Image (tube, rainbow, N blue to C red):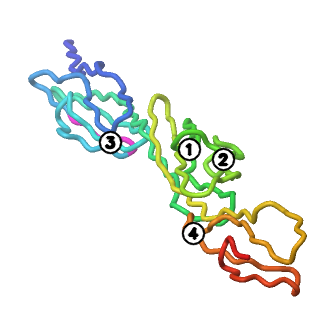
Amino acid sequence: VSINNSLPINTAGTDQSGCTNSFTMNAQAPTPTGSGLWTLVSGTVSFANPTLATTGVTASPGTNIIEWTITDNGCSASKRFNVSNNLTAPDAGIDVAVCENRVQLSGSATKPGQSGVWSIDGGITTEVFSNSSINNPEVTNLRQGIITFVWTVTNGTCTAEDRVVVTNNTPLVDAGPDRTICEDFTTLNGNNPAVDGATGVWTIGSASVNIANPTFYATS
């Protein structure tokens, strides 16, 4: 009895992983009498040439599984490969305007194996995060004006970030120092709201006081 084991050799090649969606496979090449074919097991992968052992592939984020099958002399042998696209796609949320010194951020949640951290684009800051490592912290002590927050998500060696702009429109208010006078006339010394593109008005708690121009910051 003569037995010919025609099972093709299909042992070469390694799993692919990186901070990209494009990979080049390195599977076993079939013999001249055989042929090979890539198929998808799970995930989302497109093949540049599904019959080429060293084909290029485009893979969706996460771990995708593909299979390389060699057929020769009526026998087939298959080997599976993991193709891991470790890219992250953080979303810092939509830009928002507030009229107070606090805001609730709303970044995208991290996935298993990922970590995230909030930071502020720019130099020295006064803002305080309730927890800069969660996607939806509360931020207090907002300064007036435009603040850009950065949500950075890391997956292994892969890092990506997204930005959201928070505009604090709370006007700066300074009525000036308290004073004691010995006459029935004085000039008030509030800050000029026009500097910040705002308007102001003086009000009183006594009917016996007359304000010359309630909307002028340095009125008498």
Report if residue 42 lies within the magenta region: yes
- The answer to whether residue 67 is left or right of residue 151 is left
- The answer to whether residue 83 is left or right of residue 92 is left
| Residue in front for this viewpoint, 143 or 63 | 143
Which range is magenta? Answer: 37-43
Number of marks in picture: 4
Could you tell me which residue is drawn at 72 percent across and 83 percent down? 212
Q: Are marks 1 and 2 in contact (CB under 8 Å)?
A: yes
* Mark closest to the chain's N terminus, 1 or 2: 1
Residue 107 location in percent, x, y? 56, 52
Question: Which residue has dot 4 on it?
Answer: 194
Query: Main SS type for the magenta part?
Result: strand
Q: Amino acid at mark 2?
A: Glu
Query: Crowdedness of circle 4 by 10 Å Cα count: few (<14), some, many (20+)?
Result: few
Q: Quadrant of residue 97?
A: bottom right
Question: Which residue has dot 2 on it?
Answer: 127
Report if residue 147 lies within the magenta region: no
State how far apart marks 1 and 2 are (Cα).
Answer: 9 Å
Q: Regarding mark 3 in the picture, which secondary structure is present there?
A: strand
